[in-house]
Image: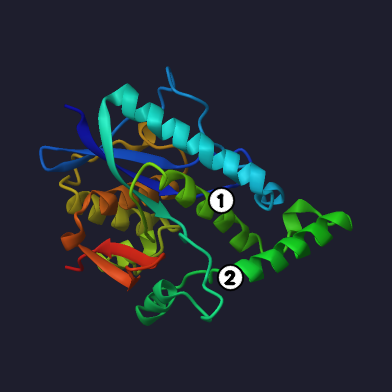
Amino acid sequence: MPENAFIGIDVAFAKKKLLPICVCVIRNNRLYPLVLKDNSNLPLYPRGRGNKLAIDTSVVENFAEEALAYICAIENKFDIKIVRIAIDAPSAFRRPEVERREAEKAMDRLGISCFATPSKEDFDNIIKKVKNHLGSGGSESMIPHANQLWMLAGFSLFEKLRSKYECIEVFPQAIVTALKCSKVHKSKKDGLTTQEKAAWNATGWTECDTPELRSAVFGSPNDRLDAYLSAWIASLPEKERTCHGNKLSDDVIWTQKAT
C-alpha cells in the first residue's frame, strides 16, 4: 500500500529558479523529507520564468502543469499517496467587495506583515502597467508591482493542483509566529537557526538529529525551511490546525494550533 505523503511548496517565479517543493512522509513520529535531487525517471522540474512572463497566462499555466506532472511522477517513483499540499501563496484574488482578504486581516491582527492580494480587476490594471512599462523600453528589473506578480503563478498552481489534490494556503511567517520563534527574521543567521530548531522540535527531530533538507529541497536555506514548514502544516489533520480567515472560501491561511 502506498505511503501517505504531504507536500509543501514555497511559491517562487524568479527567472530559472527551481520551485522549492518539499515532499514528506511520517516515519517513527517524524516528518521525513524525501530526497528529490535525484531526477532520474522524473519529468522536467518546474522553474520560474521571471516577472516579465508572469503576466502571460499561458506561461504560468504551463508552469503549473509542469508542477502537476512532476508531483504525479513523484507519487509513482516513491510509491506514495499525496494526501494534501500546502502552498505558500494566496489561493485566489481578493474579492472586489472587500478592501483586504480576511486571511490577511487575520495576519494584521497578529502583527504579521504580508503583501496585499489584488482583486482580479486590480491585477488587470497591474498587467496593463507592466505591458506599458516594457513597451516603452522599461527594464525587467524595474517592473512595477514586482512584489505581487508572483501571485499569478500561485493562483495557477492552486487551480491546477486542486484538480487532483487537496490544497491549502499557508504562510510560513505565521507558522513560526505560532511556534514563538519569529522574533529574529530568518534572513538573519540567528533567526534561521532559531526557526530551524523550533521546526525540528515540532516535527519529531532533535537538534543533533535533523532532516537533511539540502538533498531534499531545491532552493536557499530560507526556501527549504519554508517548504518544510508548509509540508508540516499539510501533514496535520484539520483538528490540529488553526484557521485564519474564512475556511468556507478561498480566503484562509492555515497554521498549526498555537502552543
Callout 1 amino acid = Ala
Q: Is residue 55 left or right of residue 174?
A: right
How many other residues sit within 10 Å of disc 1, few (<14), some (14-19) or many (≥20)?
Answer: many
Q: Of the residues tagged 2 and 1, which is closer to the observer? A: 2
Q: Is residue 208 above or below residue 98?
A: above
- Which kind of residue does numbered mark 2 sit on? Ser
Of all residues, the one furthest to the top in this rendering is 40
Q: Residue at x 61, y 38 (%)?
A: 16
Pick the quarter of the image with the N terminus. top left
Of 34 and 237, nearer the camera is 237
Residue 245, percent from left and from top = 35, 73
Q: Is residue 80 left or right of residue 136?
A: left
Q: In the rendered structure, find residue 121 and report the number of the disc placed on it.
A: none
Give the x, y percent position of residue 89.
46, 57
Q: Does residue 50 show up?
A: no
Q: Quadrant of residue 221?
A: top left
Residue 180 sits above or below residue 208 on the image: below
Q: Tag 2: Cα neighbours inside 10 Å, few (<14), some, or many (≥20)? A: some
Label 1 residue SS: helix
- Where is residue 185 drawn, in percent x and y? 41, 63
In the picture, measured across the screen, residue 36 lies left or right of residue 114, that is left
**Where residue 119 is drawn, which disc sits there?**
2
The residue tagged 1 is 153
Among the 4 quarters of the image, the one containing residue 173: bottom left
Q: Which residue sits at x=33%, y=24%?
A: 76
Res. 19 in view: yes
| Distance of label 2 from label 1 (alpha carbons) | 15 Å
Which residue does the image show at 59% across and 39% down from the upper left? 62
Q: Residue 133 in the image: x percent, y percent?
A: 82, 60
Question: Which quadrant of the rendered structure holds the C terminus?
Answer: bottom left
N-terminal of the pair, mark 2 or mark 1, is 2
